[in-house]
Amino acid sequence: MDFPVKWYSSAMQGAPSLGDTTEGALATLLKAVLVTGFGNLTVNSLTWDATLGWAVATIDGGHSYLNDSVIAISGASPSGYNGEHRVMKVSATKVWFALDGGDPGIAASGTITIKIPGLGWVITHENANGQVFIVRSPELVDAYPVSLRIDNTAFSGWSSGSGNTGYLAKVAMVEDVVDLDTYTLILEHRWPATGRYSDKRWDLVGDNLLFYFAPAYATGNVQAIYSFGYINSVRPGDRYHCILNTYHSSVASDVNRAWQISAREGANKSLI
């Protein structure tokens, strides 16, 4: 079964941390969720549970996969066990999930792994340490030309450096990308770069065109929603129905809390 919409959480198996005061944590988190996936474990046994009508994977060492999330199985024979599946039930050492084809007939053999799959987005350019990269939807560039550029380095001004220190990353809507530093800039602003002062929990929900990222940060320890991607447009042939929610300020020491949305429609650049 295809699962175009996926949910990710900091409580999931092997989930990357939002970080505290170190650059690069946000970049690592977003790459894991959007592209590579995370939480790889070895499955000790994989069988069919006839009572529940689901496959059941046993991980002897325990796990933190969550109900209703999507997992990916690989390396199993019969191949009917492999692929992406919805988790239906979990225990301390077991994960039950639905199979499109039903009972494969026999227990699985092979070197079997389980993981949280990525959302399927594509990194087109990245620097050597991975703290700066450009990521985009897997859909055609001609129809969806805007990419997201993340700069999660310790650039000048990324933190206030004293007192109630905040940490910010540069986020930019870009198009006509040639390389990491050659592109047409639509708009640059900021996202929170760490979970400093919070419990560092986060959630992300998305599909192949749009994702919503909800990190907890600052002493209020509440989650704010940031998003990037394409919404449905009422304008036929519209190539620029792309949105970017941003932090309210580009100044890390600004302690006010607000939100704003950046958008591009046609040739007009606007801050709404």
Image (cartoon, rainbow, N blue to C red):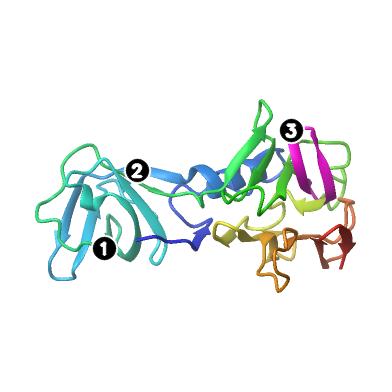
Which mark is first along the chain, 2 or 1? 2
Asked if residue 251 shows in the view, the reply is: yes
Task: Tell me the element at label 3.
Answer: loop
Residue 248 horizontal side relative to residue 216, left or right: right
Name the one closer to the observer, 62 or 56: 56
Determine the CA span between mark 1 and mark 3: 41 Å
Task: Tell me the element at label 1.
Answer: loop
Q: Amino acid at mark 1?
A: Asp
Quarter the C terminus occupies:
bottom right
Bounds of the magenta segment: 166-188
**Label ID, residue 225:** none
Front label number (1 vs 2): 1
**Label ID, residue 180:** 3
According to the picture, the residue beneath numbered tag 2 turns out to be: 41
According to the picture, the residue beneath numbered tag 1 turns out to be: 100
Which mark is first along the chain, 2 or 3? 2
Residue 169 horizontal side relative to residue 202, left or right: right
Mark 2 surroundings: few (<14), some (14-19) or many (≥20) residues within 10 A: some
Q: Amino acid at mark 2?
A: Leu
